[in-house]
Amino acid sequence: MCTGQVNVIYTGRTLGYLRSPDKQTPKMLDCTKDEMNAAASEFVTVLKGRKDSESIVVGMGDNFSPELDARAFDGFPSQPAGKMPGKHQINADQQIPHPGKDLFSWDSKTQSWLLDFDESRDLMGTVLRHQATIPADNVGCFFRLAGYDAIVPGKHDFEAGPEHVITMARFLRSTKGTGSDDQSSPVAKSLPPTAMLGANLAIVTSAPDAKPRLPLYQIEHDLEADQKKSLSAHLAQYSVIFPRGRIRRLRRRNCPRLFSSG
């Protein structure tokens, strides 16, 4: 039986403002311990004054976005030497200075960031199996360096797509001996892992405004009830109901005839 007291320290909606380093270049391959931005450095100072050995630090959603320097590279990733795995060539005048991280996938074979439409067949298979990895991320590195025990994804964390969240979760929990390349990200892997809790997530395959899916028996029951209700409302305005054929005969027999005079 646990009788001790646990001190839970939590943050909410940091929105990617706390980063280490402040800007992430495409050449960043590991976390750096002494390059936090001013906001992150000040936060860690306050956190250390309140945290003890019994404390648990949790991020309560909207951790990675939408701050620009949290979701974009500082500079366009260079293309690997030699022939690219893909078929597209991005000219210098087409390379924007701050491209979104969600436009690229990390290729461990060439040690470079590849545009999504230039992924090799092997890399595309890795992404589709939800096994993609990244060497580092300036927001992810902050959470590792600050000693967060866990984070919970929020709405804005999905602005780069669900695959980015899955990749971030893998990076946050990476330690020595994990991953396909044990020599990658030595600083990050030497830090305590940060778990991403997904109990608040659900997989939905329907359109955002689609009608809810109902079992067939409920659809049939609702249809029968609507039909009975409509039929009752239609028949309530008549006091006597005749078969259709007899009404025709009555009309023909009781209709007065007009004769012209002279």
Image (spheres, rainbow, N blue to C red):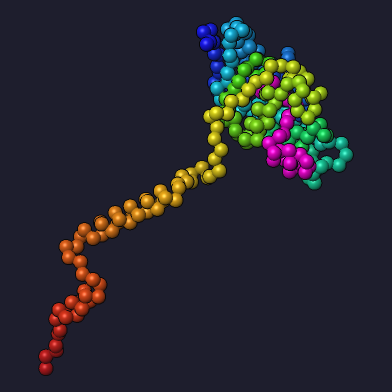
State whether residue 35 is above or below residue 178: above
How many marks overall? 0
**Quarter of image, res 252:** bottom left
**Residue 254: % across, % down:** 15, 79
- Does residue 94 appear to the left or right of 149 in the view shown? right
Q: In the picture shown, does residue 224 fall above or below 134?
A: below
At horizontal 73% and vertical 31% (from top left) the residue drawn is 133
Residue 247 occupies which quadrant of the picture?
bottom left
Q: Is residue 186 left or right of residue 13?
A: right
Relative image position of residue 65 (x, y in whole percent): 61, 28
For image coordinates 21% across by 69% down, the residue present is 242
Residue farthest right in this picture: 82
- Between residue 82 and residue 166, name the one nearer to us: 166
Q: Is residue 136 magenta?
A: yes
Query: At which x and y percent is residue 39?
Result: 63, 15
Which residue is depicted at the point 14% across and 89% down? 260
Quick check: is 227 in the magenta stretch?
no
- The outermost residue toward the left is 261
Q: Would residue 39 be seen by someone viewing this image from the given angle? A: yes
Q: Quadrant of residue 53?
A: top right
The residue stretch that appears in magenta? 116-142
243 lies left or right of 103: left
Query: Which corner quadrant holds the C terminus?
Result: bottom left
**Most distant residue in the front direction:** 1
Of 28 and 54, nearer the camera is 54
